[in-house]
Image (cartoon, grey):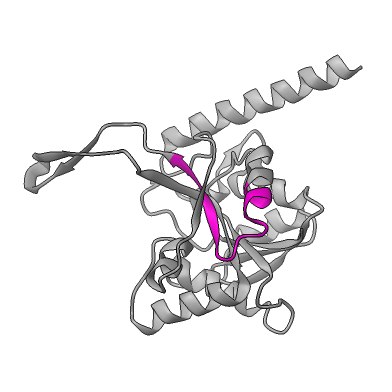
Amino acid sequence: MRYRVIVPAAGVGRRFGDRIPKQYSQIHGRTVLEWCLAPFLADPSCSAVIVAIAAADPHWPAVAARLAPVRTAAGGQERVHSVRNALATLQGEAASDDWILVHDAARPCLPAEDLRKLLETLQDHEVGGLLAAPAADTLKACGPGNVITHTVDRSGLWRALTPQMFRYGRLCEALDAACARGKVPTDESQALEWLGDRPQVVEGSAVNLKITSAQDLLVASALLAARRGESTLQEEHAL
């Protein structure tokens, strides 16, 4: 199957606390964004990569020069606006039932096997879905002053990951409907849920973490180093 991927990368990472947006932080000589794009640029089934970039982003040109050709769209105020702008660049090109994947620019550790699992599981699905990981920690609900009010039953709870995979036409419709109502979905799935759709969860690996802090960078660095080490060992074994 063929698909296109959208990567909203216009955020400034206010929680990250660094001088540059987190997607441009370095891990083993490459930016987080480059690691994020790598699985899709290496996949023959991916027919287009569209990155939504903030206006006058001073970091993107240097990154783009190191990549295979990718398309860009104007970043918006919120994620939903960036994704919708990227979808607009496909108008007249993408059919209504074409698959669109949306992946976070701050997720550099997507396993290739998880991407394959998502595509294979959902290729005939009417709505689409997303990678997710079961909630493993005990969850506490708190009130004022961070005082615990109760423990949340975690059975049936999942942590949403990306990529999220939906049909082009329905995704455009869902995001347009949300914006028309002044609502800001936290991910693409929520926008479709508001229309009454029921996306499917595909279990993915917890290593597909999202960079939100400097500590996350350290974890991602270790995970990517381990993955590169495994690849080297496999290549040596094959020889």
Count of numbered tags: 0
Q: Nearer the viewer, residue 98 or 231?
A: 98
Q: Position of residue 51 (x, y in %)?
A: 63, 63
- Residue 75 visible to an observer of this rendering: no
What is the x, y in percent for residue 71? Answer: 71, 68
Query: What residue is at 63 percent from the left and 65 percent from the top?
Result: 100
Q: Vertical placement of 113 versus 21: above or below?
A: above
Q: Position of residue 195 (x, y in %)?
A: 41, 74
Residue that extends furthest to the right in the rendered view of this protein: 239
Where the C terminus falls, by quadrant? top right
Against 7, residue 233 (above or below) is above
Check if residue 18 falls in the magenta segment.
no
Q: Is residue 185 left or right of residue 66?
A: left
Residue at 85% x, 16% y is: 236
Q: Which residues fall within the magenta stretch?
A: 118-133
Say which quadrant the N terminus sits in. bottom right
Compared to residue 140, the image places residue 87 above or below, namely below
In front here: 226 or 186? 186
* Drawn side of residue 222 relative to residue 63, left or right: left
Q: Where residue 126 sits: x, y (%)? A: 59, 65
Q: Residue at x 52, y 63 (%)?
A: 10
Above or below, 17 relative to 218: below
Query: For this rendering, which residue is in front, 174 or 86?
Result: 174
The part of the image, by quadrant, that contains residue 69 is bottom right
